[in-house]
């Protein structure tokens, strides 16, 4: 005769086994985040990523989202994170849906996504990643957004053909070879592939017959564009007049707070480090040069400085870098920048580093702009 306690016993065993499996998965995922924290060694994450990371649908760690106690999203954007994550650093995150390290200093090869079958959105743009795009990425059936622009990626583009992939960008890399002729990749414009290796096939050679507008549509679009251009010209003219009226020449040293230089006013601290035989001036001369602002960017402000002998240079004051970045880390980043060779990039001329201020110096391209250099 079957014991009446047997079904209850089996139920308890099943529930305990499921609970033990969940606990083990949570610990593995937490260990994965600990490994990332160790890789980046960021003071903020070191303080924040401690203790319990997920409970049910609540996350206690910055940039992490959870569902049913499992990690579904990692969003660490614009934090100046620097490090080389392991290729298998995300393998155990089988529930991961969204991953973004946008606008950091992450380097090395792209992580392996072969085991992250639920990934939908990946944004690793504006970093220093290199190597090929992982071929197994074409097996991410739920993928809808892949943004890898502004890195140092090489190799060829895998044959992405996911029906849901509607956002795709690999521009500003070193990718070469022909663009696969899949239906999905043919649906993207040339902007998704621009500024890559010299052997990369021009996207227009694949897409010239796609989405060709009718003559009527072209005429209407041309009229609308003409009116838009006139409006823009008028607005730009007004802005230029205001700028010319308000513009004043100032000393570059006054554009950067004087207190940053007091601690290094003597000795080698005031010497620029030149990356090539482009010397001829010291930091004191640069600080006393007449300067004007050129623009503000994500990584810092740029100024045009005219030296005593009339030579003009561009000085970029970096900001938003990893907090407490050491001089060694900064010099490593500078070497990576100096090693970039491209006809559309001005080579790095010199740099200067202190605890509070970090400067990059380039030659000034007279009457130059990105549009003219690209066309």
Image: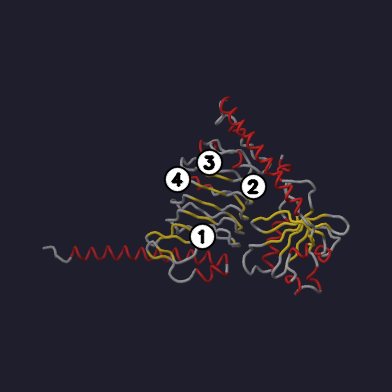
Cα gap from disc 4 to disc 3, whole angstroms: 13 Å
- Tag 4 secondary structure: loop
* Mark linked to residue 172: 2
- Residues at circles 4 and 1 in contact by the CB criterion of under 8 Å: no
* Mark linked to residue 159: 3
Q: Is residue 311 above or below residue 32?
A: above
Residue 273 image position (x, y, % from top left): 78, 64
Q: Residues within 10 Å of mark 4 (few under 14, many from 20)?
A: some
Left or right: where 225 falls relative to 29: right
Residue 198 image position (x, y, % from top left): 69, 41
Tell me how many marks there are: 4
Q: Please identify, in this view, whether the residue under mark 4 or under mark 1 is nearer the observer.
A: 4
Of marks 4 and 1, which one's residue comes earlier in the chain? 1
Along the viewing direction, whichever of 204 and 323 lies nearer the viewer: 323
- Residues at circles 2 and 3 in contact by the CB criterion of under 8 Å: no
Cα gap from disc 4 to disc 1, whole angstroms: 21 Å
Of marks 2 and 3, which one's residue comes earlier in the chain? 3
- Tag 1 secondary structure: loop
Along the viewing direction, whichever of 375 and 296 lies nearer the viewer: 296
Q: Residues within 10 Å of mark 3 (few under 14, many from 20)?
A: some
Please, which residue is most extreme toward the left here?
A: 1
Of marks 4 and 2, which one's residue comes earlier in the chain? 4
- Tag 3 secondary structure: loop
Q: Which residue is mark 4?
A: 141
* Mark linked to residue 89: 1
Q: Please identify, in this view, whether the residue under mark 4 or under mark 2 is nearer the observer.
A: 2
Left or right: where 311 falls relative to 303: right
């Amino acid at each position: 005769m079957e014991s009446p306690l047997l079904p209850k016993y089996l139920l308890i065993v099943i529930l305990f086994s499921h609970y033990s499996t969940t606990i083990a998965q949570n610990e593995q995922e937490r260990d994965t985040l600990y490994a990332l924290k160790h890789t980046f060694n960021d003071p903020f994450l070191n303080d924040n990523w401690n203790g319990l990371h997920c409970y049910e649908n609540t996350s206690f760690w910055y940039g992490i989202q959870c569902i049913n106690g499992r990690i579904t999203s990692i969003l660490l954007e614009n934090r100046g994170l620097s490090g080389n994550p392991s290729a298998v650093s995300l393998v155990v995150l089988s529930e991961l849906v969204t991953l973004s390290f946008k606008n950091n200093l992450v380097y090395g090869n792209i992580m392996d996504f072969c085991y992250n079958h639920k990934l939908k959105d990946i944004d690793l743009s504006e970093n220093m990643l290199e190597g090929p795009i992982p071929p197994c990425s074409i097996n991410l059936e739920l993928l809808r957004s892949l943004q890898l622009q502004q890195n140092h990626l090489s190799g060829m583009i895998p044959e992405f053909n996911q029906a849901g992939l509607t956002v795709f960008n690999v521009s500003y890399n070193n990718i070469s070879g022909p663009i696969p002729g899949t239906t999905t990749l043919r649906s993207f414009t040339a902007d998704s592939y621009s500024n890559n290796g010299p052997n990369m096939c021009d996207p227009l050679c694949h897409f010239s017959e796609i989405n060709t507008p009718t003559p009527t549509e072209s005429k209407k679009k041309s009229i609308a564009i003409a009116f838009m251009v006139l409006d823009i010209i008028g607005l730009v003219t007004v802005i230029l007049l205001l700028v010319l009226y308000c513009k004043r020449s100032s000393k570059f040293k006054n554009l950067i707070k004087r207190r940053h230089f007091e601690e290094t006013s003597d000795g080698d601290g005031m010497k620029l480090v030149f990356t090539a035989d482009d010397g001829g001036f010291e930091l004191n001369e640069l600080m006393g040069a007449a300067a004007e602002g050129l623009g503000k960017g994500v990584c810092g402000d740029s100024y045009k400085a005219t030296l005593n002998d009339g030579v003009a240079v561009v000085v970029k004051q970096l900001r938003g870098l990893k907090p407490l970045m050491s001089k060694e880390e900064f010099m490593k980043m500078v070497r990576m920048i100096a090693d970039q060779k491209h006809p559309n990039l001005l080579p790095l001329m010199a740099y200067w580093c202190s605890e509070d201020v970090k400067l990059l110096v380039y030659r000034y391209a007279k009457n130059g702009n990105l549009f003219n250099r690209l066309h």
